[in-house]
Amino acid sequence: MINSKLIKLVKDIVFYIFIIIMFLTSLSMIKSKQSGEVPNLFGYEFYNILTGSMEPTIPTGSLVITKSVDTKDIKVNDIITFGEGNSVTTHRVESINKGNNLEFITKGDANEVIDPRPIEENEIFGKVILHIIGLGYVIGFIQKNIILSIVIAIVLTTGFKMI
């Protein structure tokens, strides 16, 4: 019986850690949406994947987590997130032009051709370190339905404790 209690305790801990991470990520994304800044949590930035340009590697609806890196550390085949203004793209580095300034030639995995212009160092937000399939949809739902999301979270957390 001790094993089943230990298993239940571990499940509870994992569940609550997941809920806390989801809550913090959601708050970060809501705050960033209001301020126009990029969602950031402990130095990591979060982006929803809205198109299929990186499929099958990163499906539409995924959440990508990026970390700012020195552009000199970016290599061919790395996946980077870049853009300017409200235009954000996540694509794979196909090649690197090394001149006075580094320029990155990128392409979506599902695209037939490379992106129309090289990406300059100052346009890179970070290197993708992780993607979570489907979580972009969840975060998008939470951002649009914060009150309903809080109610669902309360029901889930109290409901799981009763089981």
Image: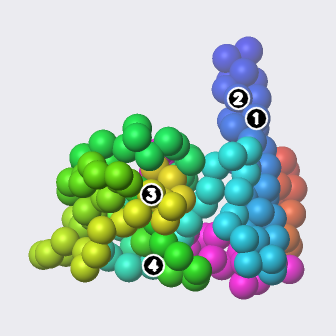
Q: Quadrant of residue 150?
A: bottom right
Describe residue 11's horizontal placement relative to residue 79 as left or right.
Answer: right
| Tally of marks | 4
Looking at numbered disc 1 in the image, what kind of residue is underneath it?
A: Ile
Magenta highlight on residue 134: yes
| Residue 98, above or below 112 | above
Residue under the point 81% across and 71% down: 31
How many C-alpha atoms fall within 10 Å of the one at disc 2: few (<14), some, or many (≥20)?
few
Disc 1, disc 2: CB below 8 Å?
yes
Residue with the mark numbered 2 = 10
Q: Position of residue 129 (x, y in %)?
A: 47, 45
Residue lying farthest to the front in this orientation? 100
Amino acid marked by disc 4: Leu
| Residue 2 or residue 131, whichever sits in front | 131
Residue under the point 69% across and 38% down: 14
Q: Secondary structure at mark 1?
A: helix
Q: Amino acid at mark 3?
A: Glu
Residue 150 lies in the magenta stretch:
no
Check disc 3: other Cα within 10 Å, few if <14, some if 14-19, many if 20+: some
Q: Position of residue 46 (x, y in %)?
A: 60, 60
| Relative height, residue 89 to residue 125 (above, below) | below
From the image, tell me which residue sits under label 4. Answer: 50
Secondary structure, mark 3, is: helix
